[in-house]
Amino acid sequence: EHEQDHPHQVPAAFKIQLPTPSTPIHSATVSAPTNIACIKYWGKASSHYNTPINDSLSLTLDQADLRAVTTASCCKCFTEDKLWLNGKEVQMNASTLKRFRACVDGIRALASDKVDDITHQIVVTRSEWETMPVHIASYNNFPTAAGLASSAAGYAALVASLVALYDAREEYPGQFSAIARQGSGSACRSLYGGFVAWRAGGEREDWSDSIAEPVVDEMHWEEIRAVILVVSNKEKETSSTKGMETSVTTSRLLEYRAKHVVPQRMKEIEKAIQEKDFESFGKVTMMDSNQFHATCLDTYPPIFYMNDVSKSVVTMVHVYNEWAEEIRAAYTFDAGPNAVLYTLEKYQVELLALVLRYYPEVGEGYVNNSELRKEAMEFALEAG
Ligand code: DP6
């Protein structure tokens, strides 16, 4: 009340500088999750369109702490497009710039007019968006998990923030995912929740059929859980892009895998998911991770992503499953040593107890659900 009577008494330092109405800043903020592949994407059919040599399938994680949060803004008052990652401005190299441009130009081409909520007047016409440079600021809150598909969440959040900013509309289902794919292949799968397939495509010349699609309803298999073991938070030594390039040119095993192994596995895993058959799901997932790392070894010179700790996790999971006389956990490894273990809700305490017993540092670092950790510790103590 007092302030309203004497507006001039508000000290200048407390006044927020808002853009003048003639140069409004339009912005939108979204978050996008990461995803972990059960059937791996490894190898590009077209590096220009960033399309894969085989289909892949992943689960989009819903953990709040494995997300990228991105704000996209645009304004006539900006002088050029800019990008910040975790607060630092990025000087884009040719490869990042190409990915960035594909996403910005791709989504902007699908923009709608912006209509004011109150006056219902068009405040920005579709074509006017092009006259405004964009500023993108992205944070990812992966505390210790470098190399955990951060590009997937990052490019998915970039695309989703642009969709929100421009109120973009798809011309065909999956078009946004085809755009995210050009940022990073695995990112196309993060635009949907639950189990998502990325169909390699290639029937159409412009690869517009290389898109992601959910294979079941997001809530279909709610009992599934992912446990992430951060074996190392160092930046991976060979980037996926570079690694798969070498694999495609040197590994005959990769060629065989793409043609003769993955198509069958996609059918198997989709059926397992539909039927909530963890036994089959787990087996295919582990075998596909193993084959992906076998193609890395078959690459010349070879690429090693898994380290000794990763390999001991593999052994632990197999010993656990043998003891249980059924598959209760399945491991998978991406282009780095960190393990992701899939399990079912009813086994998660048991599995976490095992993890905390054998990998105390890893468990401490990641099991951030204190309730769950306590339960697992008690279980471990009881079971000895
Ligand atoms: C091993 O999607 O990071 O995680 O398309 O070159 O950006 P680019 O590669 P990227 O590769 C991910 C590879 C993988 C397997 C997977 O996620 O399917």
Image (cartoon, rainbow, N blue to C red):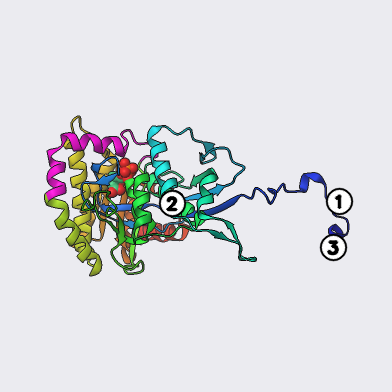
Among the two numbered marks 3 and 2 on one chain, the one whose residue lies closer to the N terminus: 3
Please name the amino acid that badge 1 sits on.
His
Among the two numbered marks 1 and 3 on one chain, the one whose residue lies closer to the N terminus: 3
Magenta stretch: give its range.
232-259
Q: Position of residue 179 (x, y in %)?
A: 37, 50
Q: Position of residue 66 (x, y in %)?
A: 43, 51
Q: Secondary structure at mark 3?
A: loop
Q: Which label sits on residue 1?
A: 3
Q: Judge from the rendering whether residue 60 lies leftward or rightward of residue 160; answer left or right.
A: left
Please name the amino acid that badge 3 sits on.
Glu
Q: Position of residue 271 (x, y in %)?
A: 20, 66
Q: Which residue is mark 2?
A: 109
Q: Which label sits on residue 131?
A: none
> Quadrant of the image for the N terminus?
bottom right
Q: Which label sits on residue 8?
A: 1
- How many other residues sit within 10 Å of disc 2, few (<14), some (14-19) or many (≥20)? some
Asked if residue 139 can be seen in this view, the reply is yes
Q: Secondary structure at mark 1?
A: helix
Among the two numbered marks 2 and 1 on one chain, the one whose residue lies closer to the N terminus: 1
User: Distance between the Cα atoms at labels 3 and 2?
Assistant: 47 Å
Q: Quadrant of ligand 1?
A: top left
Magenta stretch holds residue 237: yes
- How many other residues sit within 10 Å of disc 1, few (<14), some (14-19) or many (≥20)? few
Chief secondary structure of the magenta portion: helix
User: Distance between the Cα atoms at labels 2 and 1?
Assistant: 45 Å
Q: Secondary structure at mark 2?
A: loop
User: Distance between the Cα atoms at labels 1 and 3?
Assistant: 13 Å
Please name the amino acid that badge 2 sits on.
Ala
> Quadrant of the image for the C terminus?
bottom left
- How many other residues sit within 10 Å of disc 3, few (<14), some (14-19) or many (≥20)? few
Out of 148 and 177, give the one closest to the viewer: 177
**Nearer the camera: disc 3 or disc 2:** 2
